[in-house]
Image (cartoon, rainbow, N blue to C red):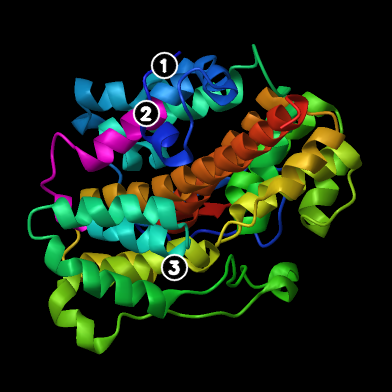
Amino acid sequence: MSAASNVTPPVVFTQDELGWVSWIDPLPEAELTERHFAGLVDRSRSKSEYFRLLVRDPEVLEARTKTDKDIFYNVADGLPRAERELAAAATSRYNGCIYCASVHARFASTYSKRRDDVQRLLDEGVGADLGERWNAVVKASVALAATPIAFGPDNIDELRRAGLDDAEIVDVINGASFFNWANRLMLSLGEPSK
Amino acid sequence: MATKDIIDTLAGIEPGSALDGIRAKRVQARDNAQKSYLSLFEPIDAGDVSLVERAAVALFVIGLHREPTVAAFYRTKLAATADGARLVEAVDVEIARGETSGPYGAFPAGPLSVENKAGLIYRVGAERKPDLGDRLVAAFEHAHLLVFRPRDAAAADMKALLAAGWSNTGIVTFSQLVAFLSFQVRVVTGLRVLGASLRRTANVAAGA
């Protein structure tokens, strides 16, 4: 077990940069092999405790990282980056992942230039009124995050009324779904620190 | 047009359909969602988490989502796994026992505490423990936590898994498995809902 007794966890949702401390042992940097570096995808991730923990299963990490990158960074088709990040931030807010929410709220603010609206999502929760288009994205993300899944035809209609086309709706589905993956890793394998 | 992958199969997406076309523009996301599935269920190294453990956890996790098509897929997978068929009934009983609605749980003490929401703290039934064994009992209890109340997770939950015989690497693979399934079942559900909506629109346009 990693020592985490000196961690000061954040107690509110924030756009500040947070740290993250693992509850179980990451691989030491000195033990990383080429198989592990392939799993990390970006060699610089060997500096991150989170990725040195996940790289204990390098094949899953590699596939997961490449899924993540395409869902969020490949903006040749589909939704603008800001709204993919909004879906990630809303999902994280709803599931309760303070760390993931901080990262993706920050990205949503950067790409949308709507920092105050993003902050209201963090402060007030997923019911905050952010305008028709963002409300539709947040509501769809939340419906997908519920268990059992509550996403239905009404969410599709609402996204269409807000102006999203089919490829953009697929990006909302992928972005929100992906954060149900990410939130469960970040919340259960360690904790954020200020 | 791409060959059907596991998401297409579970969401009912046919080659050449509108959704197939949208997915085909995002080759990397599509291929790597498939690789994630394969690396979890057909791993090159199953030393830390056995194939039957993976299939049993998958059926339990998807069963808790009450998504019958996807659950049927993983039920078949468990039944086909060596030594898995004997577990199917016990897993189904535990799914029924663990059914609830999430997310719920507690935030770190402070301003967010007003949003705390109490709910079921699931434990495996005593009568199924001999069938499942210590490792799967601990895994099911942790998987339920991850599915419904991930914000309740604490360092002590890692200790419980280690005490039940899970290695550090096994915990990572198991956590990825539960988290990946949480992604997969949502993509499948979302795309299925969108696909149905597109077919309705097409039928209206065709005057059907």
The quarter of the image holding the N terminus of chain A is bottom left
Q: Which portion, as a residue range, is magenta?
A: B32-53
Residue to which mark 3 is pinned:
B145
| Amino acid at circle 3 | Leu
Which-is-in-front pick, marks 3 and 1? 1
Direction from residue B160 to residue A141 in the image, left or right: right
Residue B101 seen in the current view: yes
On screen, B22 above or below B142? Answer: above
B45 inside magenta stretch: yes
Of callouts 3 and 1, the N-terminal one: 1
Which-is-in-front pick, marks 2 and 3? 2
- Tell me the crowding category of disc 1: few under 14, some 14 to 19, or many 20 or more residues within 10 angstroms, Cα based: few
Direction from residue A113 to residue A13 in the image, left or right: left
| Amino acid at circle 1 | Ala
Q: A9 or A91, which lies in front?
A: A91
Mark on residue A21? none
Of callouts 2 and 3, the N-terminal one: 2
| Amino acid at circle 2 | Asp
C-alpha separation, residue under disc 2 versus residue under disc 1? 8 Å
> Chain for mark 3?
B
Q: B159 or B138, which lies in front?
A: B138
Mark on residue B5? 2
Residue B171 seen in the current view: no
B117 inside magenta stretch: no
Q: Please tell me whether mark 3 sits on a helix, a strand or a loop.
A: helix
On screen, A189 above or below A41? Answer: below
Residue to which mark 1 is pinned:
B2
On screen, A107 above or below B174? Answer: above
C-alpha separation, residue under disc 3 versus residue under disc 1? 37 Å
